[in-house]
Every structure is written in C-alpha cells, then in structure tokens.
Image (cartoon, coloured by chain):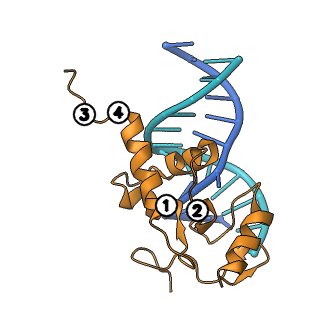
Chain colours: A orange, B blue, C cyan
DNA sequence: ATACTGACCACCA
DNA sequence: GTGGTGGCCAGTA
C-alpha cells in the first residue's frame, strides 16, 4: 500500500551505496553523487546524510562542487586524500571531481 | 502550521 | 578571488 515504494531509507541507502563505490583517488562532488543517485539538484541531501550517517563510507572522497573540502572536517579529509594520492592545496583539491560528471577541466 | 538552519549549488557584481 | 542572493529539500524547535 501505500504506494510509495521509495521511503527515505531507500534513498539514503542509495546515496551511501554510491559513496561506497568510490575508489581511492576518486573524488566527486555532492551534486555529482546526488545526480548519480537520481536526485539532481538535491546536493544538500547528500551533505546532510554524510554528516549524520554513522555508516562506514569514504566520505572524504566527497567535496563541494568548487573542489572545496568539507567544512568542519578539512583536517582529516586532507590527510586522507593526501594518503590516496590526491593533491590538496589550501583546503581545496586541484582538479576536483574526476570521473563521469563535471570534470571541470 | 511557521521559522531557522544546514558537510550545497548556480548566478552575478 | 570574494561576497551576496535565491533556490532546493529535510530536520528540528
């Protein structure tokens, strides 16, 4: 019933699943994940979810669309990214989201 | 129900 | 490069 087959849990799960699929050195933005999850424009959901979730996901591989590191976790994120071979300068990654979307030259 | 905030994004000055 | 504004949606008071 109730028709709605999709409950928020399903949606969150989908987003987390995408974050888990990220490999070392692969950095994407919130918007990219949201879009890949089927929710274009809802980047805030991704941010809120990663901020609240306790799941074991590589959140550090997610940055803002401007390549800026996550506010409140820049230190740890920087260390982790550097450990994976990602170039980080002054709190922002050089060449942000690789991969399928964006890839702002 | 309204109001505010937020690990965002795009646009424009 | 910085800063302000609007839009988006969800959680919380």
* Pointer 1 with pointer 2, Cβ within 8 A: yes
Position of residue A27 relative to residue A74, above or below, is below
Q: Which mark is residue A83?
A: none
Q: CA distance from mark 1 to mark 2?
A: 6 Å
Distance Cα–Cα, label 3 vs label 4:
6 Å
Closer to the N terminus: mark 4 or mark 2? 4
Q: Are marks 3 and 4 in contact (CB under 8 Å)?
A: yes
3D distance between C-alphas at marks 1 and 4? 19 Å
SS of the residue at dot 1? helix
Q: State which mark lies toward you, 4 or 2.
A: 2
Q: Which residue is mark 1?
A: A19
The residue identified by callout 2 is A58
Residue shown at the point (48%, 61%) measured from the top left: A20
Q: Are marks 3 and 4 on the same chain?
A: yes
- Location of residue A59 in the rendering, given as x and y in whole percent from the top left corner: 60, 59
User: In screen coordinates, is A20 left or right of A48?
Assistant: left
Q: Residues within 10 Å of mark 1 (few under 14, many from 20)?
A: many
- Of pointers 1 and 2, the one earlier in the residue sequence: 1
Secondary structure of the residue carrying tag 3 is loop
Between the residue at mark 1 and the residue at mark 3, the CA separation in whole angstroms equals: 23 Å
Sequence order check: which comes first, mark 3 or mark 2? 3
Q: Classify 10 Å Cα crowding around label 4: few (below 14), some (14-19), many (20 and above).
A: few
Quarter of image, res A94: bottom right
Q: Which residue in the structure is indicated by mark 4?
A: A7
Residue A61 position in % (x across, y down): 59, 68
User: Which residue lies at the image location 56% right of the left edge and 67% below the top edge?
Assistant: A65
Q: Residues within 10 Å of mark 3 (few under 14, many from 20)?
A: few
**Cβ atoms at labels 3 and 2 below 8 Å apart:** no
């Amino acid at each position: 019933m109730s028709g709605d087959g999709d409950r928020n849990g399903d949606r969150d799960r989908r987003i987390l699943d995408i974050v888990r699929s990220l490999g070392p050195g692969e950095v994407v933005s919130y918007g990219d994940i949201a879009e890949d999850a089927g929710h274009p424009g809802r980047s805030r959901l991704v941010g809120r979810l990663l901020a609240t979730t306790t799941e074991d996901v590589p959140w550090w591989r997610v940055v803002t669309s401007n390549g800026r590191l996550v506010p409140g976790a820049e230190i740890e994120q920087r260390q982790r990214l550097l450990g994976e071979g990602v170039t980080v300068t002054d709190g922002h990654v050089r060449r942000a989201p690789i991969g399928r979307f964006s890839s702002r030259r």
